[in-house]
Amino acid sequence: MTLSSLLLASVFSSACLASVWDFDISVRNTYRTIQWDLGAPGTPYNLLFDTGSATLWVLDGNCTDKCPNISGLPRTTYNLTSTGEAFYNTTDTIDYDGGEVSGYLVSDIAGIPGTDVSFRQKFASITSSTWAGLGADGFLGLASSSIAFTNTTAPFENAMQLGLLDQPRFAIYQGTALPTVANQSPENDGVLTMGGSHEDLYADGEVQFFPVETPFEVYKAKFLGLSGSNHFPGQNEQHNSLNWAGDMVFDTGSDLIEMPESQIEAVYNMTPWTYNQLMSGYRPLCSDFNSTWSLSFTFGSDDDHKTFTVTGDQLATPGYVDDDHCFPPFNPWGSNNIILGARWMSNFYSVFDFGSFDPSNYDLRIGFAPLKKEYQPKI
Ligand SMILES: *[C@@H]1O[C@H](CO)[C@@H](O)[C@H](O)[C@H]1NC(C)=O
Ligand SMILES: *[C@@H]1O[C@H](CO)[C@@H](O)[C@H](O)[C@H]1NC(C)=O
Ligand SMILES: *[C@@H]1O[C@H](CO)[C@@H](O)[C@H](O)[C@H]1NC(C)=O
Ligand SMILES: *[C@@H]1O[C@H](CO)[C@@H](O)[C@H](O)[C@H]1NC(C)=O
Ligand SMILES: *[C@@H]1O[C@H](CO)[C@@H](O)[C@H](O)[C@H]1NC(C)=O
Ligand SMILES: *[C@@H]1O[C@H](CO)[C@@H](O)[C@H](O)[C@H]1NC(C)=O
C-alpha cells in the first residue's frame, strides 16, 4: 500500500513539472557512463549509455562467478529493495557485439540524480555476464523498446511516455576526455541531456538533421558515400570517393568505426596507412592522425541527407599498446553496414529527436553540429 501511494504521488508531481535532465558523463576504465538511481532510497548505479541497444540492466547482487570483474573498479550490484518486484521466471538474454548478459525482469523505482524525480521502471537484473572489463554496473540502452529485454520499456521512452520530459529528445556532449593507457578513467566534462538539448552552449554552428530509418530499432540512416581528401608531405593533394549499398548505425556503445570487410582496403587507402600494413602488425603513430587528411561521410535519406567531415586528428584514439600509438580507426566486419562509434561522434554535439512523445507518431531524426573549440576532445 505504502508503495503504490508513494508512486502515484511522485509520478503525478513530476508530470506537472516536465523537465530537462542533465547527466554527467564519466569515463570509467574507457567506458562512458552516467548515473541513475534504482530502489528506494535510491542507490546510484554507473551505467554505460548505449544508443546501440535498448535495455536498462544492472548486475545482480548474487552474481559472482558468472559475472567476472576485471574492470579494476568496484561495482554496485542490485538486490531487490522494498519498492522492487522481481519476476524470476521472466528471463531473457541480450547478445551484444562485445558480450552477452542474461537475467530476469525486475520493476523498481528509478530516480534521476540531482532532482526529486522518480518513477517506476522495468529493467533486468543480470545473473550472468561476459562483460568482465566493464567499468560500469550495467547498461542504459537508448534505442527502441522493440529490441529491449522482454517486458521492459527502454528508460528514455518510458520517461517520455510518463510525461516527465520537456521535449522528446536526448542529446550528447561526450566531453573533452579521451582515455589513454596512462589513464583509463580520466576526469571528464561530458553531459547527456534528456528532454532537451544544449546546442547553444556546445555547438559551433547549426545542428544539421537527417532522418532515421524506419522501422525504428536502432539509430540507422542510409549510407550515401564516403570521400577522402589528403595532402601528405611530398605528394599532390588527392581526393577519392566510395559508395555502396548499406546503412550507417550510430552507436555510442562502440568505440571505433566498423566497416564492411569488402571495402576496408579501399577505405584505408584514404588514410596514411594501407590495410595490409596494419594487418602485418604496423601500429599507427598518433602524430599520423593530423589535419593533412580528412574523411567525409554522407548519410540520411535519398532526398534529405547531410555530409559531415572529420580530419585525421579527430579520429585519434591513443593507447594502442602505448600512448604514442593510436588504434587504427576502422575495423572490418561481415556486414555492408557501417557502425559509427563514440570516437567519431565525440567530435559533434549530437541530438536524437523523436518528433513526438507518442511512439505511434515518432518522426525520428538525428542532428550533429561541430563542437566549439573548448569542448573538443583533447588528446
Ligand atoms: C547486494 O548484495 C551483495 C551480496 O550480498 C552485496 O555485496 C552488495 O553490496 C549489495 N548491493 C547493494 C546495493 O546493497
Ligand atoms: C540472493 O541470495 C540470497 C541469499 O542466498 C537469497 O535469499 C536471495 O533470494 C537471492 N536473490 C536472488 C535474486 O536470487
Ligand atoms: C571488482 O573489482 C574491484 C577492483 O579489483 C573490486 O574492488 C570489487 O570488489 C570487485 N567486485 C565488485 C562486485 O565490485
Ligand atoms: C516459476 O517457475 C517455477 C519453476 O518452473 C514454477 O514452479 C513456478 O510456478 C513459476 N512461477 C510463476 C509465477 O510462474
Ligand atoms: C510479459 O508480457 C507478456 C505479453 O505481453 C504478458 O503476458 C506477461 O504477463 C508479461 N509478464 C510480466 C512479468 O510482466
Ligand atoms: C601528418 O601525417 C602525415 C601522414 O602520416 C605525416 O606524413 C606527416 O608528417 C604528419 N604531419 C605532422 C606535422 O606530424
Image (cartoon, grey):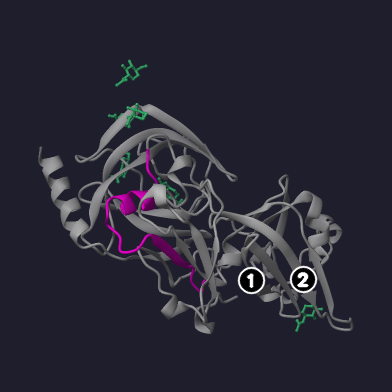
* SS of the residue under disc 2: strand
Residue drawn where x is 42% and y is 59% of the image: 355
Q: Which picture quadrant has residue 263?
A: bottom right
* SS of the residue under disc 1: strand
Q: Which mark is residue 294?
A: none
* In the foreground, 20 or 31: 20
Quadrant including the C terminus: bottom right
Q: Earlier in the sequence, mark 1 or mark 2?
A: 2
Q: Amino acid at mark 1?
A: Phe
Q: Is residue 333 magenta?
A: no
Quadrant including the N terminus: top left
Whether residue 282 is visible, yes or no, is no
Q: Which mark is residue 228?
A: 2
Residue drawn where x is 70% and y is 70% of the image: 296
Identify the residue at the far front of this view. Answer: 303
Whether residue 198 is visible, yes or no, is yes
Q: Amino acid at mark 2?
A: Gly
Question: Which residues lie in the magenta part?
Answer: 152-177
Q: Which residue is mark 1?
A: 308
Measured as percent of width and height from the top left, residue 240 is found at 82, 69
* In the foreground, 40 or 213: 213
Measured as percent of width and height from the top left, residue 178 is found at 55, 69
Measured as percent of width and height from the top left, residue 36 is found at 33, 55
Q: Is residue 337 left or right of residue 358?
A: right
